[in-house]
Each structure stands twice: as structure tokens, then as C-alpha cells.
Image (spheres, rainbow, N blue to C red):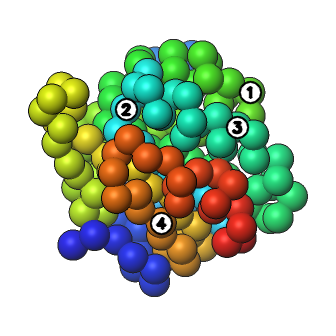
Amino acid sequence: MTIKANDKLPQGKVLVPGEDGPKEVALADLTKGRVAIFGLPGAFTGTCTNAHMPSFVRTADAFRAKGIDAILCITVNDPFVVGAWARETGADKAGIQVLADADGSVTKAMGLEFDAPPAGLYGRCKRFAALASDGVFKVVQIEDSPGTCSVSAGEALLEKV
């Protein structure tokens, strides 16, 4: 079942890149307070790198000014790729935590997994953006196509805060 407003965030663990290597963290520990969460098909892919992540880098300060405590990005990639991508896109400097859902379990628990064999993508996360408060989704916006970044863009979600 696909996530929707008023659903609880799934229980699960993600990997967070760090100086001492990846660290496993419970998603619940990262989603306390008011949180903006967005998910995407993959680090270093076209729309993710050129549109989706930049939209949140541009709006990060505006989210915080509206009382958002954390901005989280979830992608089905390994934590080493996630760390490199966060540095390359400026997500790390913007205060966006990029989380590796390495086995896709969190993505599956949200009902957002998809495959795109022509692009070589399997078990990936649909493109979405959401607002959550204390572990409950308040707004969920899911793109119809993985190559589109409109309702899931930082600017679109910021309008809902």
C-alpha cells in the first residue's frame, strides 16, 4: 500500500554516511519534530541530480525558516555513493541528510518501489516529497513518472508547509 497523509512513517533502518564509515540509524530517530522528506530513484541519475536535489538545496533555508527541523532524502543506493553524491550536489552543505536505503526495505514499506529495466534501475524509490510531524505524514506528493520533478520539487513542497 502506498503512503498517504495521516499514515505513520514506516519502521526501518537506513545507512548514514560518516567519517568513520556508514552508520545504521532508525528512521524514527531522524523523523522527530517537523521533517521534510523526499525520495528519488537514484544518486547521480539525471533528474535526481539536475532537478530534484537542487530544488531542495535552493529551498533548504526557507524550509528551516518555516520551522522544519530536518530535511531528509531517501534513495536506494549504497552509503558510499550517497555520501559522494551529497558532497557533489551540495546537499551536505545545505544541511540535507541523504540516507541510503541500501536494501530498499524502507522504500518497500512506503509502497514506493518501482523498476525501470530500460534504465537499469531495479527496486528503486518513486520520486516523492512529503512533510511529516513526529513520525506521521501530513502531506505526501508522488510523481506519476520517475523522470518528472514537479509536485516533488522543493518549491512545490514548501508551499504546503
Residue at mark 1 to residue at mark 4: CA–CA distance: 25 Å
Element assignment for label 2: loop
Q: Amino acid at mark 1?
A: Lys
Q: Amino acid at mark 4?
A: Gln
Residue at mark 3 to residue at mark 4: CA–CA distance: 18 Å
Tell me where residue 55 sits by quadrant.
top right
Residue at the (67%, 67%) spot, across then down? 34
In the rendered view, would you say 123 is above or below 158? above
What is the number of the mark on residue 141? Answer: 4
Residue at the (67%, 72%) spot, across then down? 160
Residue at mark 2 to residue at mark 1: CA–CA distance: 20 Å
Label 2 crowd (10 A; few <14 / some 14-19 / many >=20): many
Tell me the residue that label 2 is attached to: 42
Residue at the (82%, 53%) spot, across then down? 62
What is the number of the mark on residue 93? Answer: 1
- Residues at circles 2 and 4 in contact by the CB criterion of under 8 Å: no
Residue at mark 2 to residue at mark 3: CA–CA distance: 17 Å
Q: Amino acid at mark 3?
A: Val
Tell me the residue that label 3 is attached to: 57
- Please report whichever mark, 2 or 4, sits nearer to the chain's N-terminal start: 2
Horizontal and vertical percent position of residue 53: 58, 36
Pick the front one: 108 or 142: 142
- Please report whichever mark, 1 or 3, sits nearer to the chain's N-terminal start: 3
Horizontal and vertical percent position of residue 137: 49, 74
Element assignment for label 1: loop
- Residues at circles 1 and 4 in contact by the CB criterion of under 8 Å: no
Residue at the (30%, 62%) spot, across then down? 110
